Image (cartoon, rainbow, N blue to C red):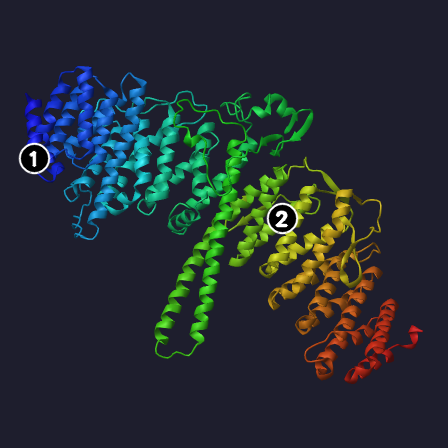
Amino acid sequence: QAAESGIIKVKTIAARNTDILAALKENSSEVVQPFLMGCGTKEPKITQLCLAAIQRLMSHEVVSEAAAGNIINMLWQLMENSLEELKLLQTVLVLLTTNTVVHDEALSKAIVLCFRLHFTKDNITNNTAAATVRQVVTVVFERVVAEDEQYKDTIDQPVAVQANSNRRSVSTLKPCAKDAYMLFQDLCQLVNADAPYWLVGMTEMTRTFGLELLESVLNDFPQVFLQHQEFSFLLKERVCPLVIKLFSPNIKFRQGSSTSSSPAPVEKPYFPICMRLLRVVSVLIKQFYSLLVTECEIFLSLLVKFLDADKPQWLRAVAVESIHRLCVQPQLLRSFCQSYDMKQHSTKVFRDIVNALGSFIQSLFLVPSTGNASVMPNQTGSNALGNTGSAQTNPGVLGIGGGATVLPAFEYRGTWIPILNVTVQGSAKATYLEMLDKVEPPTIPEGYAMSVAFHCLLDLVRGITTMIEGELGEAETVSQTTAETTSLPAQSSEQQDLQSVSDQTEKELVSRAVWEEMVNACWCGLLAALSLLLDASTDEAATENILKAELTMAVLCGRLGLCVCQKVIVTTSKYWILNSDSFLFNFPLAYSIQGQNVQMISPSSESHQQVVAVGQPLTLQPQGTVMLTSKNIQCMRTLLNLAHCHGAILGTSWQLVLATLQHLVWILGLKPGVGGALKPGRAVEGPSTVLTTAVMTDLPVISNILSRLFESSQYLDDVSLHHLINALCSLSLEAMDMAYGNNKEPSLFAVAKLLETGLVNMHRIEILWRPLTGHLLEVCQHPNSRMREWGAEALTSLIKAGLTFSHDPPLSQNQRLQLLLLNPLKELSNISHPDIRIKQLECVLQILQSQGDSLGPGWPLVLGVMGAIRSDQG
């Protein structure tokens, strides 16, 4: 009967109306009625046909709100009788995705229906229902976005929030937003194991599923939470407390405590919950940091706590993955620094994260990985290690097809940790945070946590330096352009120009403070961790990456003018280059900087590097020999690179760099030749220096780089050049002190390099002539014959070069400069050593031969030199 009257109805509608669909929609309750009754028969065949028909009606959007309500009630009955469950889910999805007529109670009923089907006995139904729930939740939030889009031009005045803004009322929200609000609020209720307000009729729910839904909503629709204060209120009042509450068992848990006190009924053990919580926290920090400053502080300190050595291995692994997600977002780290580290009574969150990574790495070396199945011999991922026992006896060597290959690894005081290839540079690809299907905590392959932590450090350094250097560059260009504009004469707009310039400088000061705070907060911890890894690294690529990170940090400190930090970083590099039973500096590096004690672990003596050179240390009493390994040479190249490319920002750190290079040159037996270049020469002491062929071939390269380093001093500005000359003079003074009272071979590095620097800076010789020649005259008076011979060589070479150089204006017109250049020659007459006087006269002879005709006013000086040859000198 119903069917027949329905057919008549449809016919009349088709006959009378031009717009058939709209008319059908008005009468859809009657049209749908027969199909609903058909479903009521509970006959499988009929039910299937009816559901298919209803879906067709929906897909043409001819279902009114009332009809939709009736359809949902009918679907509910079918669900309670567990009939046609997959078809039901399909129908709900079609109903909710094709139109927006379903709201309020009807919508909540449809959602509950899907949730209930997620917990049936049948696996396929469960999985389909889970997928449907996810889609439906997404649809509900997509409607909010569409609704906001639709009303964005008609901005209605936001209702003034009452003084106590924890209003529960959602009366101000539009229909779609209201549904989404109720849904999200109930998800929080369910995860918290409380009864829902809106999703009436829920029978059961798992925490894991609830957390996944919360995470996907927060991740996919941040704008909804940021634009509607009702939603931000939910975040603050419901989500954050919930997360903190659920974390509590993990915080209290200590490994080795016998009972694990479980909170309110949690269906599954920790791993699934904890891992999902960390995912939610990652999203909260990434998307809503600005809203949740205080809450994020708590989350971040929790993350740091989870790295502690007494936490289970899998918890430490997922925590380090979460921290890695933060480390690849420099802007976020910068906000941490501004919101926490720079505030007076706040936790130093950024510093803590960096230090925690450092102590985490240290703990991995110090704690043998026993207990928590952190090593499973035959587990995939680490099965390459074969039997762990054998791997321990002969660490890092794999017998593959007879030939042994060395695995990249860190080795420190007997603890061997392989370096796994965990992620690409600059992206945090997590493994364990993605294991949503695992119930049992996974076994973590050995070396995984260490490799992630290592990448954290590298990404942190790279991110921070790229960000700060980019901003520094911008600031510099802006200040240049403002300087240019202000120098142009424009009267009328001068006021506002000045205003904008002062705004600019203020902005720059603020940024600068943040940059400095970031570097100050992290460099101690970074350096301690990187130095430890550098010592432990047995892999050339890893060593290269660590050195690169230290280099970029040193350069950044230099550009920001943070001398203390830069000095320490350079000192550690120096320490590494010369670390051979630390003969030169017998100190474990412990710095107390700004009250932070940083203990650098002193290098482990059993180095696994190939020894490439053995030589004498440059000290007063030779204490045996020194061995240089390939790692020392690698470090040296980094230091040379630093000095070569960034000499202008080294400032007083030049002293450290040069002392280190002098030492190396000494060990490698390089001797000065013409013009001050160092050439491989045999050490006078001979037998103690042993160089492998690998280094022998490298020597010309090293001496070449050294010469290029000093040649590039012509591009330094005057101040930096003075820093360089001062450093060389004080090095030379030290070498002179060492050479007193013995006639052994002195170190001539500084004298040779003073000569080389003078020769390439002839075009501005006036600014450095006095300090340069003044020092060389002192060297010429030294009792050690080799020392003073080189002093005189350097001085006379400089004078000859100065006189032949084509100055602008030429010397014939610049009498003052000519006398300045010749003056040291006259000063040599005060020295009584005959060898020096011979050098002096040879020099005069050469000058007369080449430039006698152009000496002019210099003649009295030259004649004075000859006149000073007294009778007692034969």
Query: What residue sits 49% from the left and 55% below the top?
Result: 469
Number of residues whose C-alpha sits closer than 10 Å to that of mark 1, classed few (under 14), some (14–19) or many (20 or more): few
Per the image, label 2 sits on a secondary structure element best described as helix
> Which dot, 2 or 1, sits closer to the camera?
1
Above or below, 426 against 520 in this view is: above
Q: Which residue is mark 1?
A: 15
- In depth, the one of 851 and 8 nearer the eye is 8
Can you identify the residue that label 2 sits on?
Answer: 573
Question: The disc labelled 1 sits on which kind of residue?
Answer: Ala
Choose the circle earlier in sequence order: 2 or 1: 1
Q: Quadrant of the C terminus?
A: bottom right
Find numbered disc 1 in the image and state the secondary structure of the residue it sits on: helix
**Can residue 199 be spotted in the picture?**
no
| Residue under the image location 38 percent in, 30 percent down | 274
Q: Is residue 207 left or right of residue 480?
A: left
Q: CA distance from mark 2 to mark 1?
A: 91 Å
- Furthest-front residue in this view: 15
Rendering coords of residue 19 (x, y %): 12, 40
Q: Position of residue 378 (x, y in %)?
A: 54, 20
| Occupied quadrant, residue 382 | top right
Task: Report the label total.
Answer: 2
